[in-house]
Amino acid sequence: MPTAPLPLLVALATADFDPTEVVAPWRAARAAGLPVVFATEDGGPAACDALVLKGPLFGLLGATPDHCAGYAELTQDPDFQAPRDWRTLRAADFGGLLLPGGHAKGMRQYLESRSLQTLVAEFFARSLPVGAICHGPVVLARTRGADGQSVVAGRRMTALTRPLENIAWLLTAWKLGDYYRTYPEWVESELRRAVGDAGRFERGPLIASYGNPFTVRDGNLLTARWPGDASRFAEELVAMVQGESAPG
């Protein structure tokens, strides 16, 4: 009798995560019959960045209508409504890990969580699939392995690029201030420092669009830049967790 697949663990900030970067993998996992477990730092409920559902700039720069509808559906999922406490979890009980992003200040709790970093280090120690998108790779940059270095030192990867972060900030600063600047340092700058000279940070196509998604796969690590990459990223991550080749 075939064994049941180990679930994909989705670690969520309590507030301000990006809805698209959770909805797309959740949908892909569900379509593939892969169980999903959600977790927050204390097992309390999580909520996305509500401004992204509305469109931060006069209805623009937000989630697509399809992903907004997907988020409404996600919030009715009993597993989403009852997240686990990631401080109590073991990497060995899961087939892979998803670290979604989000840029509003509520994300700092998640991006700075030492307990999440401890769990992430377990996934890397076991070479289990880890997918991180947008700001999610910041968690990886701050996670240390047994050698004391970041778990992404020497790896190929991507994350929210400086051009993407800068454009969003410049377009909205007059109205939203530093809403698009989670930290004074650019995400790309922190990730370049984490991968070091032996690694490589990749920006992908100059023009980012939903029609031209970009991901970087390096062994057990899959990374992407922004919500426009989320659908391709989701398919590839689910395939990794299931031990299959990435979709063509």
Image: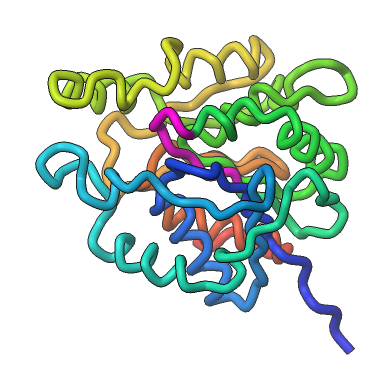
Residue 196 at x, y percent in the picture: 65, 12
Residue 33 at x, y percent in the picture: 63, 78
Above or below for 109 versus 9: above
Q: Residue at x 40, y 32 (%)?
A: 103
Q: In this view, does 153 lie to the left or right of 19?
A: right
Residue 197 at x, y percent in the picture: 64, 10
Q: Which of 58 and 248 is in front in this view?
A: 58
In the rendered image, residue 102 lying in the magenta stretch gets the answer yes
Residue 214 at x, y percent in the picture: 42, 43
Q: Which of 86 and 138 is in front in this view?
A: 86
Q: Is residue 22 left or right of residue 128?
A: left
Please provide the residue range marked out in magenta. 99-106
Q: In which quarter of the image is the N terminus?
A: bottom right
- Say which quarter of the image contains residue 34: bottom right
Above or below for 130 versus 192: below
Farthest-out residue, left? 58
Question: Magenta: predominant secondary structure element?
Answer: loop
Color scheme of the displayed model: rainbow
Above or below for 122 versus 63: above
Q: Which residue is drawn at 23% across and 19% down?
A: 177
Farthest-out residue, bottom? 1
Above or below for 116 versus 82: above
